[in-house]
Image (cartoon, rainbow, N blue to C red):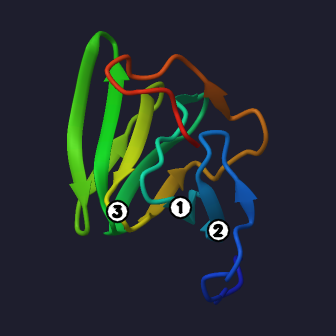
Amino acid sequence: MTRFATMTLPDEPTVVAPDGSDVRVLLGLAGGGLAHFQLAAGATSRAVRHQTVEEIWYVLAGRGEMWRSQNGHDEVVSISRGTCLTIPLGTVFQFRSFGGDALWIVAVTMPPWPGDGEAVLVDGYAAWDSPSA
């Protein structure tokens, strides 16, 4: 049986993700995990593809864009506070922050994040400048 867990958002990032965003690892259970991502104001992440996990993202603050590509379908969507989106298994994605505020995002990862090597760097969205992250 899984024990109860409680925590608050750490002041400092737990790790920097391969895409360049700051990650604060939160809690998890057998079926998935929760993390907080922060991308600095004006920054563009590196493009990645996950090997075994899929995610659901919810934007808490900031604004920007998300590019997703899967099986020949590409899409760029605006993201801001209240936006919720999915990153299905095998999707290539990249995101960027606009304006003077960082993007703050919480994401559920299913199954739980397995560790180093899960996110593979890939070619990014050609219409965006070189990543600044």
- Crowding at dot 2, Cα within 10 Å, few <14 / some 14-19 / many 20+, comes out as many
Q: Secondary structure at mark 3?
A: strand
Disc number for residue 37: 1
* Kind of residue sitting beneath label 2: Arg
Residue at 29% x, 44% y: name it. Answer: 65
Left or right? Give the position of 116 relative to 64.
right
Left or right? Give the position of 74 relative to 125.
left
Residue at 23% x, 28% y: name it. Answer: 75
| Residue that mark 3 sits on | 58
- Image location of residue 34, percent across then percent down: 55, 65
Q: How far apart are the two marked residues, 2 and 1, measured between alpha carbons?
A: 6 Å
Q: Secondary structure at mark 2?
A: strand
Q: Secondary structure at mark 1?
A: strand
Residue 30 visible somewhere in the drawing: no
Q: Are marks 2 and 1 in contact (CB under 8 Å)?
A: yes
Q: Nearer the viewer, mark 1 or mark 3?
A: 1
- Image location of residue 87, percent across then percent down: 39, 39
